Amino acid sequence: MVIETLNHREKKDRPGHLDQSEKKKLPGNKVFCANLVAVVTLCLAITGCQQSPPPQTKQTPTVNSSAVNLDEYVTLPKVYPFDLKSAGKELVGKSAWVRTGYMLPYYGYDASARTAELGHKAGVLPPLDKLEIKDVILQRAPVTVAPGQIAIIQKQVLVVVKRQRDGGLYAVPVGMNTGEDFKFNANDVLYFADPHELYKHWPAEMWTAIDKHEACQSMSELQAEMALGSKATYFAGDFGNRNIEYSGSGKTIKIKFEKNHATLITEK
């Protein structure tokens, strides 16, 4: 009897269940409707229990279609001199390559007197000219003083270099000295590692044009500067999207850059 009672209660607890006594209280059509509602309610209850959770949407990683500019990952070796003695330690024995082509002057050098011929400029160094640094000297810069003017004594910091091109010894300025104050620009005018190694990811044909100091299609601004030098006139526009006129090599070459690629080259 206990089992029957429990079964009876369990049935009464089911969603939409009506026992016989309750059905008798309902008219014919209402009984049918009540039974239909009970069946639908029971189906919904069962379906709700068996329904699986909605599938999770996988996140597709975004792929950057633009090519990585490997130039941005190149680290240029630098020197950090703060006076003449530290400059000797930092620079002597190093190889260097001209960074500011056709802008960096060089002077004759008298090794016996350890003196540069600052009154007579031998010329300007072409881009990527290779130099071997042999010494660092400090020498008073020539200055012209008008009557009544007071001259501030300034000295130039010069590296004594051997040019790979002709084997000669020359003096190249890399800083200034006033009293106890030294200012160096060696990192701005020289590379202290071979650019061919620093930018070895560039195509061979690009390096061929650069070494011949020639402009070619698709050159970037950096590549054009290495080929044609830093003596240039910059026209309006953002970096990589402007016209630049190079005039250091004795001839004038104008390049139009779009998205940092040379698209038009004209020679005057």
Image (cartoon, grey):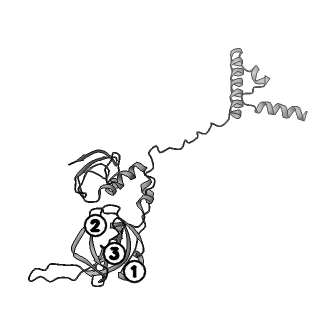
Residue where numbered disc 3 is placed? 159
Residue where numbered disc 1 is placed? 86
Label 1 near label 3: C-beta < 8 Å? no
Q: Position of residue 92 (x, y in %)?
A: 40, 76
Label 1 near label 2: C-beta < 8 Å? no
Looking at marks 3 and 2 on the same chain, the residue that comes earlier in the sequence is marked by 2
Looking at marks 3 and 1 on the same chain, the residue that comes earlier in the sequence is marked by 1
Camera-side residue of 154 and 204: 204
Give residue 7's quadrant in the image.
top right
Q: Secondary structure at mark 3?
A: strand
Q: Position of residue 214 (x, y in %)?
A: 31, 51
Q: Between marks 3 and 2, how big is the CA–CA gap? A: 12 Å
Quadrant where the image shows the N terminus: top right
Q: Is residue 72 above or below residue 4?
A: below
Q: Secondary structure at mark 2?
A: loop
Q: Between marks 3 and 1, how big is the CA–CA gap? A: 13 Å
Q: Amino acid at mark 2?
A: Leu
* Crowd around label 2: few <14 · some 14–19 · many ≥20 (10 Å): many
Give residue 175's quadrant in the image.
bottom left
Which labelled disc corresponds to residue 104? 2
